[in-house]
Amino acid sequence: MQIGRFRVPMMASLLIWALLWEIVGRLGLTILLPPLSAIAGRMAEIVPTPTFLAAAWITLQAFLAGNLIAIALGVPLGVLMGRSVIADRMLLPWVNLFLSAPLTALVPVIMILFGYGQTTIILTVVMFALWIIVLDARAGVRNIAPSLIEMARVYGATPLQAFLKIHLLAALPEILAGIRLGAIRAVKGVIIGQLLVSIVGFGRLFELYSSNFLMEHFWALILVLFAVAFALAEGLGYLERRVEYYAAARH
Amino acid sequence: MTPASHASQAAPAAPPPRPIVQVERIGKVYPGGVEALSDLSLDFPEGQLTTLLGPSGCGKTTLLKIIAGLIEPTRGQVLVDGQPVSGPGPERAFVFQDFALLPWASVLRNVAFGLELRGLAKGEREAIAEQQIQEVGLKGFEQHFPHQLSGGMRQRVGLARALAVDAKVLLMDEPFSAVDEQTRRKFQEDLLALVAHQKKTFLFVTHSIEEAVYVSDRIVLLSRRPSQVTRIIEPAVPRGGDPDAIRRHASYLDTVETIWRGLKHYVD
Ligand SMILES: Nc1ncnc2c1ncn2[C@@H]1O[C@H](COP(=O)(O)OP(=O)(O)OP(=O)(O)O)[C@@H](O)[C@H]1O
Ligand SMILES: [Mg+2]
């Protein structure tokens, strides 16, 4: 059974966990876990405040700017690696290294180079999102049916025509998957960047709430961010599925 | 498609057509040392359908791609219309086994794609494409996408694309192997009609002896890798008339039998 896009069992299990949280919160076992209803009330209270909206706005800016830079760099780089063996040999080890590296450890280095501000946060976002975009664009180009490339050659495509009319479009499913995964990583990047810089956006709010033991505020903020990140991932996944028939028709 | 015109074409007295594709002492060794072709020479007469038939892996696709200019031969050269081949060219078109259609483009755009790459204006190329879509029997499907079509219809799109660029030579690598048997037979008849009233040369690869005998003017039998021509057969099968009658005709059955005996020892 289906209500909207959500299957009922998933909603039901969510409800059970929410109920459990409420009960544990009301038992007053720990100050760290207020009841869910109180958090929900606090959420409704703080979300419309100018402080929250300003934090959301600056976070959104860093998130979008970082993603755009990562896409603009990552897609051409990935396509290049997918097409050129030499470029692939030169770059693949680095891409793989950065993909699995604990990138959080590098944020302080960016901080030293670019200061405690928005630039550092944007670069953190780029660093989190970039590598998966590169790898997926590369995989997409490598997955293109050889006959499609041969078709372009037989019918006289120039290298530029082949890139624009074949490679980019044929690799689109993987490129979009990379952008989606990059955006999910970028959410981590923007929050980690803000937490470490801690004077910008939600980082500043987290700092404020946790140092003053405002646990309801703290949880409200976390739930908002989780919900936004989840909605973002689902939304991008939906967009991606809409172009999936490309992939099916390629092999 | 009258039987009479075909009979006169097939008559031995007619002057032999000039070879439009000449394969001269071609050798191909793939990186890694697989010798696919060795010193192979072969002429393809203009306006005819010549089929390459041989055991799997003997180098038929390799030869077709060398003629298309997609693969460089290790030795020898290919002449098309007297000119040595150094890459793909507008006088040759290719029909792919897996259709090689753009999944994101309509039938119309797919058929016009060769002309689009040549820089023809949109109106002009779509007019030509519409004509070819009609020619292959897909009228009404111009705005459909490949995933909305059956395998047989997709291959018609691939065929229309090859016809739209008006190449002299059509290279077809097992074009019907991905479609079901009924569709395949319909295709074979349509192909015969195409050969009859388009002044084009068809180079055809198939695994099916029956198909080869049914559609070919000439059948080139190739040996196992490294491939060489073992025999050239010109089936004297009557054309036109009832397809089922043709498939029961003595000369059709004899030719199938002859080729089968010629190829049988490769199976063992
Ligand atoms: N790119 C390649 N690299 C190395 N070897 C290859 C390559 N392409 C083909 N070969 C080898 O060359 C030989 C001829 O291959 P080819 O595809 O031309 O045969 P074919 O006659 O078309 O076979 P089939 O009937 O199965 O389609 C085979 O042994 C194959 O393994
Ligand atoms: Mg083959």
Image (cartoon, coloured by chain):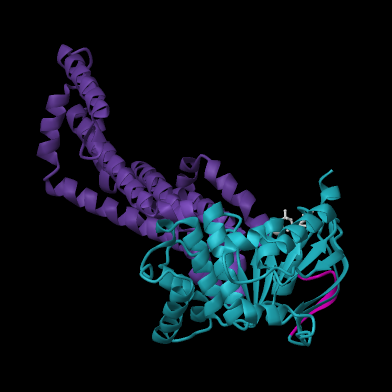
Chain colours: A purple, B cyan
Which quadrant holds the N terminus of chain A?
Answer: top left
Judge left or right: residue A122 versus residue A34: right
Closest to the observer, B16 or B141: B16
Closest to the observer, B27 or B260: B260
Q: Please give the name of the residue rendered at 68% of the width and 61% of the height, measured from the top-left corner.
A: B249
Question: Which stretch did the figure color magenta?
Answer: B71-80
The answer to whether B186 is drawn above or below residue A136 in the figure is below
User: Can residue A229 be seen at all in this image of the molecule?
Assistant: yes
Judge left or right: residue B99 versus residue B70: left
Q: How many marks?
A: 0
Where residue A42 appears, as percent x and y from the top left, is 12, 33
Q: Please give the name of the residue rendered at 22% of the width and 24% of the height, measured from the top-left corner.
A: A12
Q: Based on the displayed image, in which of its 4 quarters is residue B213 positioned?
A: bottom right
Residue B70 lies in magenta, yes or no? Answer: no
Where residue A178 appears, as percent x and y from the top left, is 45, 51
Judge left or right: residue B191 versus residue A75: right
Where residue B200 appears, as percent x and y from the top left, is 63, 81
User: Can residue A159 be seen at all in this image of the molecule?
Assistant: no
Where residue A32 appears, as percent x and y from the top left, is 24, 21
The answer to whether B109 is drawn above or below residue B20 in the figure is above
Closest to the observer, B134 or B116: B134
Q: Based on the displayed image, in which of its 4 quarters is residue A101 positioned?
A: top right
Q: Please give the name of the residue rendered at 25% of the width and 23% of the height, measured from the top-left corner.
A: A13
The secondary structure that most of the magenta stretch takes on is strand
Q: Quadrant of ligand 1?
A: bottom right
Residue B78 lies in magenta, yes or no? Answer: yes
